[in-house]
């Protein structure tokens, strides 16, 4: 029955039944599930996919568990076979013995890998049996604790368990290695048992190493068996030991057992059941006789007691209840005793049967004492899980112990005769069902690792909660999605009604206003794009219910219809208007617009990219500026969508009169012009790099060159107009495009294709279409390069140092000039080809000439010989001849003869030397040294080609000008350094230069500045006089080597200083001047006038007029002037002035009247209405007082 139950409860069978049930539910119930009008599981492929996913999940889970068990078992066994390398041999073993043990253990593990251990549910056949096979990882593990000789081995051998290794290795147990080297391993079909008897009594030389190895083994169990590292402990107690050991020996025995149990509890951190096995009960006198009548099945039963199970750490200690349980066992024995006594005929055996219950009773005190010492609650913090106590007998060997008789003999003082020695009967008592039906069946009683279990429980509940949340969330998501999609459909329906009205409001006859149609087009295309899906369908509208795709398909259909029936007619009307408005002489535009018009009318000739580009170009020119960039971009998108349709046709018929008119005008727009125009529009040569100064002039080009047009140096000649652009680009396409447009003209111009005969005549009569296109191209080639060459010039230098830098770069060995010029020559020499190219061309030309000769005979004989100047020249000579002079100037005549460019570069070097010498001279304050370089540049430049001619002229002229500017700058610096600062301090804000100032310019400062040989005069004579033309009024700067030095406003102050010097310092190094005072009139109220000028007196008292000369400074040396009148007036009798300019200050107090003679003036002094008038005459016509040079002078700060 158990096998049948195990079959139907097997996980694999349950999994299979679950898969079938799930598949049936999905297949038959799935189509019934609907969300609104959507049945997501109705399609068969959806259901098949879902069934497959469920099967994969279930099978994957089984495979994962199988793989995990296999990997865990492998890693566990690998860990078991690894012995610590640093463990020394024990006192009773050698390294060789350790190696032999390791090899034997590895052999056992390898054997176990080949042996499939049967599951707990028993063997069943077929697939179920194979799926029940377990690895050691999944079997229960038990630890035997008990001293050697306690009967463990005998009990296991006679337990009825099957040992897979017995047949392979000849032994049921295997000696452990590594952390279990003191243990024996027992591998059975039902469990793995580890006998720790060796650790029970071991006294290794290095206990720390031994303990670390054992702890490592326990950690290994925790790692690979995290829930239940072990499933229980089998504590074995020998009945003979309990009867024969002294209390001290029993206490030591209990201490060892307690230590072993403590190790496991502390290391593994779980509560596991402990089964106490009292072994060797057959050594109790009467055991064999008492139970000899039992059958095999009866001998397999359990004899003992199991305590009430509780996993709670604070559960009551079951040990006190053992006393009552023991009494119950004794009652069972006493109940059986009478029947056994009746059945047994042998009197001696009867005596033993009668005394057996007393023998068991005599065992109780020792066992209870032992167990009480082992299971001490405080030792573990929580009571160990004592599961039960059981009596067993593996075999009946040895001499039985009669505890009752012994006690009587000792009490009465005689020796009891020992019992006869027993021989093995080969029977086991009370073992088989104890292990299989009690201990192994309770393998799940072991408490789990608390931390691991909490983590596992958290993960488990987390998974449950996640599934629940996911399920609820999915239902909620469907509900929300359904509601939002319903609202979305309503919004689209409302928008559709509005758009329908907009479409119906469009004029019946289309016009050319495409912008007015733009809102309607955008609205139709964007019908499904409501605010809810403006940035794409939100997650809340998906989950399989999103309706936007279907709505968008309908909107797209309406949108394409509107493009064909409303947008396309407006485009056609606009192109017709454009075709009518094109100027009569703009034939290229007429051709292109007509071509687009015909494309829109007949899709067989449509080129979408070309048509779109042409229409957008028209929009750029015709649409008002109020049309925004976004609107233009939107129109372009609509246009591309229209042209991309494969099934559209024009709703308007073509205008035959308009087409005929355009074709008639285009008879003047030849095919060569159209071909050339097409080639340029196609971007022929765009693959080739643009020729620019930056790329061809070398790394220094950007330092010296610039463009006249201010374009960057990286811009230049397009790749179309380059040697490679011509030979590899233009020539490779000109023939093909010529043919294409020749074919195109049949439907654009409505002309028939030329016949082969016409083509042959064109070939013989002159240039064909390709040659004419080439001629147009080569003429443009010349124009483009001429404009480019004229646009290159030297960068304008802003200082002499920059000019020198430019000259140095241009004259250096890596000068950019030869690099640039040679590159220009290469690109403007088209007729020159490589030798291989010449061979191919010559061969092709020979063949063509042969064909032309044959055709010439067919069409009228030989052609006349061409005696024109261009006879024998190729079309490329159009370019080569135009730039022949430049080519010669750059390349020279060849044969080792230097080119003219080499001589020009030497002249550049001369300019560089001239400018460098000039800079050196200027820096030292000297004038530039003479040089003939500018003159030679002027003479040679006339024979040079552009752009080098203008470059050299600019370099020389600008350099010379900058040299003079540097000279001016040095002179300006010299002014400031020599006297400028002193001059400003000495005269600024001082009298007489500042008429209102109370402070005077001192005599010494005035002399130091303005005297002959003074600061100003000295600087002028030493540094400035050679550049100043003093013959001009005002003074001016001279020209230096024909280059003017410019204007210098400060020269006026030097000229004024010279005038001051001539007036004040004509007599020496001290300023001096003379005046003659002559009385003219004096008021009658004044009786006497006295003027004392630094010791010189002018006295007048209405007497004869006597002129008096006064010199300044006077002889008194006090620089004081006093004026006194008598009698004194109300304001006083006169006034006094003092200082180096005291006389001038006296004049300032009087009324001064100038005369026609500059040296003469009248001065009137007033005293309270009384006047004294003098005629004052200077010693020179250059009157010091009021001298304009003196009043206008200011200190020069530079030459500006």
Image: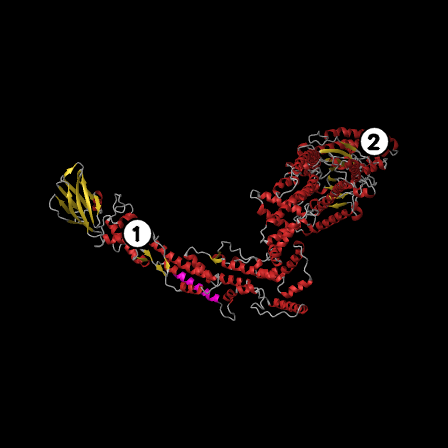
The answer to whether residue 1112 is visible is no
Q: Which residue is mark 1?
A: 1053
- Label 2 or label 1, whichever comes before in sequence order: 2
Q: Quadrant of the N terminus?
A: top right
The answer to whether residue 264 is visible is yes
Numbered circles on residues, count: 2
Alpha-carbon neighbours of circle 2 within 10 Å: few (<14), some, or many (≥20)? some
Of 855 and 466, the residue lying toward us: 855
In this rendering, the answer to whether 679 lies above or below 623 is below
Nearer mark to the viewer, of 2 and 1: 1
Q: Quadrant of residue 15?
A: top right
What secondary structure is marked by label 2?
Answer: helix
- Residue range highlighted in magenta: 900-917
Q: Main secondary structure of the magenta part?
A: helix
Of 153 and 747, the residue lying toward us: 747
* Left or right: 906, with 396 as reference point: left
Q: Which residue is mark 2?
A: 354
- In the rendered image, residue 912 lying in the magenta stretch gets the answer yes
């Amino acid at each position: 029955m158990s096998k049948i139950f195990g079959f139907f409860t097997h996980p694999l069978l349950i999994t299979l039944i679950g898969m079938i049930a799930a598949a049936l539910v999905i297949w038959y119930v799935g189509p019934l599930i609907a969300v609104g009008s959507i049945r997501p599981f109705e399609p068969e492929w959806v259901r098949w996919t879902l069934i497959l996913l469920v099967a994969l999940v279930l099978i994957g889970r089984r495979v994962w568990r199988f793989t995990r068990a296999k990997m865990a078992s492998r890693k566990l066994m690998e860990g078991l076979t690894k012995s610590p390398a640093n463990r020394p041999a024990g006192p009773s073993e050698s390294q060789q013995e350790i190696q032999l043990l390791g090899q034997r253990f590895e052999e056992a593990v390898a054997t176990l890998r080949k042996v499939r251990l049967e599951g707990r549910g028993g063997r069943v056949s077929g697939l179920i049996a194979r799926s029940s096979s377990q690895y050691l990882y999944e079997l229960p593990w038990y630890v035997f604790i008990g001293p050697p000789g306690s009967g463990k081995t005998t009990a296991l051998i006679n337990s009825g368990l099957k040992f897979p290794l017995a047949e392979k290795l000849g032994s049921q147990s295997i000696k452990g290695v590594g952390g279990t080297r003191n243990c024996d391993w027992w591998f059975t079909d039902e469990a793995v048992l580890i006998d720790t008897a060796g650790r029970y009594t071991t006294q290794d030389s290095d206990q720390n190493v031994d303990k670390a190895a054992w702890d490592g083994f326990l950690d290994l169990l925790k790692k690979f068996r995290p829930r239940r590292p072990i499933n229980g402990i089998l504590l074995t107690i020998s009945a003979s030991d309990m009867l024969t050991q002294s209390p001290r020996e029993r206490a030591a025995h209990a201490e060892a057992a307690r230590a072993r149990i403590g190790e496991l509890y502390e290391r593994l951190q779980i509560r596991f059941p402990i089964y106490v096995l009292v072994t060797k009960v057959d050594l109790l006198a009467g055991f064999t006789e008492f139970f000899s009548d039992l059958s095999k099945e009866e001998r397999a039963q359990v004899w003992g007691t199991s305590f009430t199970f509780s996993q709670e750490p604070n559960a009551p200690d079951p040990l006190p209840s053992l006393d009552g349980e023991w009494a119950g066992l004794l009652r069972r024995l006493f109940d059986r005793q009478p029947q056994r006594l009746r059945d047994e005929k042998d009197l001696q055996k009867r005596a033993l049967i009668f005394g057996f219950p007393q023998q068991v009773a005599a065992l109780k005190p020792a066992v209870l004492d032992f167990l009480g010492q082992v299971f001490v609650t405080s030792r573990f913090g929580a009571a160990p899980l004592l599961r039960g106590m059981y009596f067993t007998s593996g075999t009946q060997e040895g001499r039985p112990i009669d505890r009752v008789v012994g006690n009587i003999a000792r009490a009465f003082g005689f020796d009891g005769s020992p019992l006869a020695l027993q021989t093995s009967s080969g029977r086991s008592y009370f073992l088989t069902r104890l292990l299989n039906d009690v201990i192994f069946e309770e393998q799940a009683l072991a408490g789990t690792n608390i931390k691991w279990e909490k983590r596992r429980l958290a993960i488990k509940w987390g998974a449950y909660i996640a599934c629940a949340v996911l399920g609820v969330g999915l239902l909620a998501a469907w509900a929300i999605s359904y509601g939002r999609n319903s609202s979305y459909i309503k919004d689209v329906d409302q928008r559709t009604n509005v758009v329908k009205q907009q479409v119906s409001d469009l004029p019946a006859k289309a016009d050319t206003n495409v912008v007015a149609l733009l809102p309607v087009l955008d609205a139709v295309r964007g019908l499904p794009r409501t605010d809810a899906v403006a940035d794409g369908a939100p997650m809340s509208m998906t989950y399989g219910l999103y309706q936007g795709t279907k709505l968008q398909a309908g909107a797209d259909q309406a949108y394409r219809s509107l493009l064909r029936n409303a947008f396309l007619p407006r485009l056609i009307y606009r192109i017709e208007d454009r075709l009518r408005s094109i100027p009569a002489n703009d034939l290229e535009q007429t051709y292109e617009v007509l071509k687009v018009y015909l494309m829109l009318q007949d899709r067989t000739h449509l080129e979408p990219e070309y048509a779109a580009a042409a229409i957008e170009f028209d929009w750029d020119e015709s649409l008002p500026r109020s049309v925004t960039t976004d609107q233009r971009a939107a129109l372009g998108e609509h246009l591309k969508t229209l042209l991309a349709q494969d099934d559209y046709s024009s709703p308007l018929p073509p205008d035959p009169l308009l087409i005929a008119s355009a074709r008639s005008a285009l008879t003047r727009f030849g095919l060569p012009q159209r071909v050339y125009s097409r080639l340029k529009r196609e971007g022929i040569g765009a693959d080739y790099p643009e020729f620019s100064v930056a790329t061809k002039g070398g790394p220094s080009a950007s330092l010296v060159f610039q463009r006249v047009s201010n374009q960057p140096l990286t811009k230049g000649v397009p790749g179309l107009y380059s040697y490679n652009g011509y030979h590899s680009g233009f020539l490779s396409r000109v023939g093909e495009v010529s043919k294409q447009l020749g074919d195109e003209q049949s439907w654009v111009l409505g002309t028939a294709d030329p016949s082969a005969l016409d083509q042959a005549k064109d070939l013989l009569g002159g240039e064909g279409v390709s040659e004419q296109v080439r001629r147009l191209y080569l003429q443009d080639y010349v124009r483009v390069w001429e404009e480019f060459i004229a646009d290159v010039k030297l960068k304008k230098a802003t200082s002499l140092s920059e000019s020198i830098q430019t000259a140095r770069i241009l004259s250096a060995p890596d000068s950019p000039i030869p690099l640039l010029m040679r590159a220009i020559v290469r690109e403007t020499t088209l007729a020159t080809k490589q030798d291989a190219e010449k061979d191919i061309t010559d061969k092709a030309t020979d063949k063509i000439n042969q064909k032309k000769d044959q055709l010439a005979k067919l069409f009228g004989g030989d052609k006349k010989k061409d005696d024109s100047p261009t006879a024998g020249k190729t079309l490329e000579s159009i370019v080569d001849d135009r730039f022949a002079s430049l080519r010669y100037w750059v390349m020279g005549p060849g044969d080792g003869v230097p080119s003219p460019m080499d001589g020009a570069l030497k002249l550049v070097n001369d300019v560089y030397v001239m400018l460098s010498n000039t800079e050196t001279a200027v820096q030292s304050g000297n004038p530039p040294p003479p040089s003939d370089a500018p003159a030679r540049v002027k003479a040679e430049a006339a024979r040079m080609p552009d752009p080098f001619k203008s470059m050299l002229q600019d370099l020389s002229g600008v350099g010379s000008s900058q040299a003079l500017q540097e000279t001016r700058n040095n002179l300006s610096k010299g002014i400031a350094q020599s006297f400028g600062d002193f001059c400003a301090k000495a005269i600024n804000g001082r009298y007489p230069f500042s008429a209102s100032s109370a402070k005077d310019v001192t005599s010494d400062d005035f002399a130091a500045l303005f005297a002959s040989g003074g600061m100003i005069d000295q600087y002028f004579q030493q540094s400035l006089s050679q550049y100043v033309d003093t013959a001009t009024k005002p003074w001016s700067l001279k020209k230096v080597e024909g280059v003017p030095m410019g204007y210098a406003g400060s020269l006026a102050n030097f000229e004024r200083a010279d005038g001051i010097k001539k007036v004040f310092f004509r007599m020496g190094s001290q300023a001096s001047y003379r005046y003659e005072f002559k009385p003219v009139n004096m008021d009658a109220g004044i009786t006497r006038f006295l003027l004392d000028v630094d010791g010189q007196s002018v006295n007048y008292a209405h007497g004869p007029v006597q002129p008096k000369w006064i010199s300044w400074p006077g002889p008194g040396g006090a620089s004081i002037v006093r004026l006194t009148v008598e009698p004194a007036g109300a304001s006083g009798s006169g006034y006094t002035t003092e200082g180096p300019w005291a006389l001038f200050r006296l004049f300032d107090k009087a009324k001064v009247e100038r005369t026609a003679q500059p040296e003469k003036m009248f001065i009137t002094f007033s005293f309270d209405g009384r006047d004294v008038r003098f005629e004052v005459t200077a010693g020179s016509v250059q009157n010091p007082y009021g001298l304009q040079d003196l009043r206008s002078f200011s200190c020069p700060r530079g030459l500006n």
